[in-house]
Amino acid sequence: MSSSPAERWIRRFRDDDGCETKLVCFPHAGGWASAYRTWPLGLPSDIGVLAVRYPGREDRMGDPFPSGLEALADDIADALGELTPHRLALFGHSMGASVAHEVALRLQERGEPPAALCVSGRRPTHELDGQRKFFGPDEKLVADIVRADASRAPVFADPEMRELVLPAVRADCRLVDDYPGGPRPPLDCPVYGYTGDRDPEVTVERMRGWADLTRDAFRLRVLPGGHFYLRDEETALLADIGEVLHHIKYRTEAAS
């Protein structure tokens, strides 16, 4: 018997009956769902922690890569349709922020918008013009990744591991480079932005541009660090997200 779309696309790190809010996390380019495996430790027990399983990596190694970022968002939105009776919040870092935003738009078009969108380390959709291209020869890709995230240097130094992870990195960089961005309809949910104060990929001012993509509230939190600030600042980031989701919970309950 084949698994449901949600089972194929979503990894559940915590999702029991007491999880009234479900936080769905979207990895960065070349990233894996397991990047969010520690997040339940930093969030209240009534918040479920789920992560999107992109094709072509981890236990989806044999699945084909998506043809484009918007096609990827289509598939994820379909999978999340099984979860929309619950209160969903979306969090995406870097490429994952664009994917989460596109998914939020699709859920809203279906009359089931998320309760909140959290975006991290990524320019807003309408300000992608002029962003540097990421795809190129393998050596350039590896150098760019290690420059932004030194913790991955040992992976690329190991020939077997390098061969294992590079296909997903190549595919995701193509998604990022080919994604046209541009104007999008405003969301009806609040948007919360996060970024590192030394992120070379996006300035604080660029992150503030996400305010243009919602009819609801927008708030930006700047934390110390570069593009992968969320590694060293995980405790502070999750404390803030926990407060955000606490506020969203009581706001939605008051409105019902």
Image: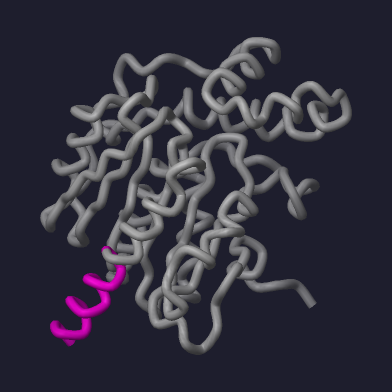
Q: Of residues 189 and 237, which is closer to you in this image?
A: 237
Q: Of residues 132 and 225, which is closer to you in this image?
A: 225
Q: Is residue 123 visible?
A: yes
**Residue 236 rendering spot, x and y as whole percentages:** 37, 52
Q: Is residue 85 visible?
A: no
Quarter assignment of residue 255: bottom left
Quarter assignment of residue 168: top right
**Residue 84 rendering spot, x and y as whole percentages:** 40, 75
**Residue 33 rendering spot, x and y as whole percentages:** 61, 53
Q: Quadrant of the C terminus?
A: bottom left
Identity of the residue drawn at 59% across and 63% down: 10
Residue 28, placed above or below residue 110: above
Q: Of residues 224 and 155, which is closer to you in this image?
A: 224
Considering the whole magenta stretch, tell me its main secondary structure. Answer: helix
Q: Quadrant of the N terminus?
A: bottom right
Identity of the residue drawn at 60% across and 68% down: 13
**Residue 48 rendering spot, x and y as whole percentages:** 48, 73
Q: Of residues 35 and 11, which is closer to you in this image?
A: 35
Is residue 202 left or right of 171 when viewed as pictured? left
Quarter assignment of residue 238: bottom left
Identity of the residue drawn at 37% across and 48% down: 102
Residue 136, placed above or below residue 238: above
Residue at the far right: name it: 160
Q: Quick check: is 197 in the magenta stretch? A: no
Identity of the residue drawn at 74% across and 49% down: 58
Tell me the magenta residue range: 244-256
